[in-house]
Image (tube, grey):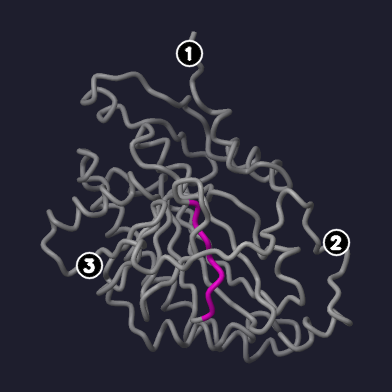
Amino acid sequence: MAELLSNWFEDERILENYVFPPEKRPGELVVPIGKANVPIVDLHDEENNTIHHIMKVSQDFGLFQMRFILSYLLLLEQVVNHEISAELMTGVMKGRLQYINISICPSNTIEFFRATVGPFVIALRDLGSRILGLISKGLGLESKYFAKELSEDCTLTINHYPPCPNPSLSLGINKHTDPSLITILLTGEVPGLQALMDGQWMGVETLPNALLVIIGNQLEVVSNGKLKSGIHRVVTNAKEARSSAAFFINPTKSCIVEPAKALVEAQNSEPLYKAFQYKDFFKAYTDASSGDIVAVLEAFKIKNS
């Protein structure tokens, strides 16, 4: 499929509708790779240490790595020792073309989902629950605060980015934050994810078999701004196709999302965000998909009188 997609481009040209406006293009600027800057959280560590680490990197960066290690980076952490087998993660990434070619080989795709994607989703749901339980404790909330409606709607997406003749003119995904509670990301071996840190883009390099956890807009609301949504984007490259699998843990559409009352009271502060139904936020988010997605959350803040 990557060959077919890359055949759309001839003479080093990009189709007009794939060229971004000048102000949104990544350009020729070399973006450094921030392997050492992406915090790593080890889920096999002592629980209090793990909670402290997650809260620190989530406040500072918005992402972390897990191998069941969690790492920093705009609330992006790498998680290591997460107990999702390397074989299962490799199977998902190797089987991605069957997912893409669903209309070509439906019988193989169904078997791929049954054998690989199904167990992967179940494992990610369990991992997400564990991470949210640690975050609950870190915020001073009861351990199951994020259970049920706040985290019941989960979606797995598999993204595929073919080689691009001129990566300086286009992006795989524009700058954005996620509308989710948290996102668990399997990035594969080809780099492309970038996170905005201290006003500069930093390339995210993950550890082997690590998962990235990105803090979403809903967790920023519930934490009353204590945890920040990770701003990130995806760039392309001229030589290699890239795939990733993103697992979004979301509230149900009818769920009321608001700053946790117990947290606001404990901080002796005022809520920073209005209470809203998640479906209203998601509509505003999708309506802004061609504009400034990062600014969507601002509309749900309580304005100072």
Identify residue type, mark 3: Asp
Residue beneath disc 1: 304
The single residue placed furthest to the top in the displayed view is 305
Q: Position of residue 59 (x, y in %)?
A: 33, 44
**On screen, residue 114 above or below 143:** below
In the rendered structure, find residue 227 and report the number of the disc placed on it: none
Q: Residue at x 41, y 84 (%)?
A: 88
Q: Nearer the viewer, residue 200 or 158?
A: 200
Foreground: 150 or 274?
A: 274
For label 2, the residue is: 17
Residue numbers of the magenta segment: 190-196
Residue type at numbered disc 2? Asn
Dividing the picture into quarters, in which one does residue 14 lie? bottom right
In screen coordinates, is 26 left or right of 44?
right
Give SS at disc 1: loop
Quadrant containing the N terminus in the rendered view = bottom right
Q: Give neighbour class at mark 2: few <14, some 14-19, many 20+ (Cα, 10 Å).
A: few
**185 left or right of 38?**
right
Q: Few, some or many C-alpha atoms within 10 Å of disc 3 (few <14, some 14-19, many ≥20)?
A: many
Q: Earlier in the sequence, mark 3 or mark 2?
A: 2
Asked if the magenta segment contains residue 195, the reply would be yes
Q: Residue at x 14, y 56 (%)?
A: 49
Residue corresponding to mark 3: 42
**Do the residues under discs 3 and 2 have CB atoms within 8 angstroms?**
no
Percent x, y of residue 83: 27, 76
